[in-house]
Image (cartoon, rainbow, N blue to C red):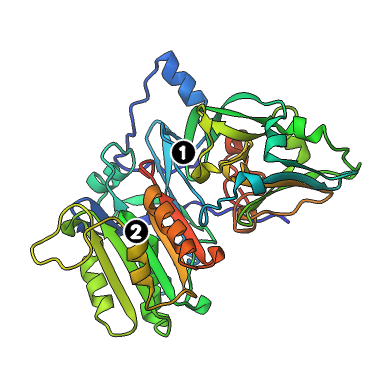
Amino acid sequence: MVDRFVTRGFVGRPRSSGTGAGDFASRTPPGQYLTTDFPVLSAGPTPRTPLDRWSLTIDGLVVSPISWTWPEFMALPAREWTVDISCVTKWTKLDMRWRGVSVDTLLEHVELDPSAAFVIARADGGYTTNLPIADVLNGQAFVAFEYDGRALAPEHGGPARLVVPDRYFWKSAKWVRGLHIQGRDEPGFWESLGYHNRGDQWLEERYSGD
Amino acid sequence: MVASPIAWRLSTVASIHDETPTVRSFGLRVPDWAGHRPGQHVDLRLTAADGYSVERSYSIASEPERSGEIELTVERIEDGEVSPFLHEVVVPGDQIEIRGPIGGYFVWEAALGGPLFLVAGGSGVVPLMAMLRHRALVGRSTAAALLFSSRHFEEIIYREELDRLASAGDGTSVIHTLTRSQPAGWDGYTRRIDERMLDESLAPLGASARSYICGPTALVETAANALVRLGLPPDRIRTERFGPSGS
């Protein structure tokens, strides 16, 4: 941060010193700007799996894999989550209100193999993203099915998407259908295309090598 | 495996020209630029004297074959923080930090083949223009069509260059739709992109086309969903979306 070039004539938006503004500023990761709308970013067409053909599966390095149908998934204990989200395309949206099932709750239904260390989220359309298991435990991740009091819209990942608020939003796989448990790490879709393997927005881990 | 970071570089603004009343192109000289692929973008960083700093992503409009500089085309967003600065303050000779190229999926190169079906809304045409310019130089054996939605005739970005590409007789067609107003004698489409328009525009290329769609969310959703219904395999449809937040 020391050797940034000062751009001639650039002042930027007023930096107000009110407490509210300071709070917003402290919640905005480096290089991000706040937005109030909910932009849509996807690499391809929006998949549409009917709920009667939908399932969510945990497999891989577990003693016995498990799969929930939509009604079974809906019967799991869910709760409200209000979290700040940052997308690698630079927007940050504060206080996004979701309803979903904690990944902790999902993992309670399986017994992990001792060598289990990584989870590969798999989604309709072939999208994947990788996370260390340690990064999705203890309330750090959930599978959301409502946003702002309504069923999650398809373009935002409905019927259900993974949400990992402490990572750039590409880690929050839309249209999630499975959590595959592995012993070794394996880059997912964007992680294979030049984006950072971990994606911690507070460390500005946008691209490979950051 | 430790990858080296994509370094910030100090580019120099070499040229500026207007594309439309609200869209302007900037030619940037970038030292040690390693080249890019059509469809990729760069990150741009502005820093104020007090250390306050902002970053934005902009698509590269120029083809990789252009040597010595890259071109960015930027729409002025009224309440934006970066695009008004680029439009009103920046002059040739100014220096701006950029890094890239970034993005490895929304990319088309001649070696990928086609046919190539491009769908754009407004400034979403920018990364597609890099593909068309690249194709015109090294990919003329690939048939290509661009379906381009603009609001008004005066807002058609790259209008004259697109006319030249379409009249070159090398297999490129450009189909415009003007959704808000049309000049006298306009015989093109006058409505938002819909399934019938996509079907008609795609027909000469066939359902084996590779499709790249870039624009506002609603346009991208409409076009991608319709192309799936028209029989294009979902894995040949690549999308990039611009929203109001793309300032």
Instruction: Name the image quarter holding residue B132.
Output: bottom left
Asked if badges 1 and 2 are on one and the same chain, I answer no
Give the residue drawn at x 21%, y 56%: B155
Marked residue chain, label 2: B
Q: Is residue A197 visible?
A: yes
Q: Calculate the distance from the C-alpha at mark 1 to the C-alpha at mark 2.
A: 29 Å
As rendered, which of B239 and B11 lies closer to the eye? Answer: B239
Q: Which mark is residue A91?
A: 1
As rendered, which of B93 and B195 lies closer to the eye? Answer: B195
Q: Which mark is residue A151?
A: none
Disc number lying in front (1 or 2): 2
Give the residue drawn at x 73%, y 34%: A103
Q: Is residue A61 above or below residue B19?
A: above
Q: Which residue is mark 2?
A: B194
As rendered, which of B212 and B71 lies closer to the eye? Answer: B212
Instruction: Report how many numbered discs are placed on residues in the image.
Output: 2
Q: Amino acid at mark 2?
A: Asp
Give the residue drawn at x 41%, y 31%: A36
Q: Amino acid at mark 1?
A: Trp
Q: Is residue B23 above or below residue B160?
A: above
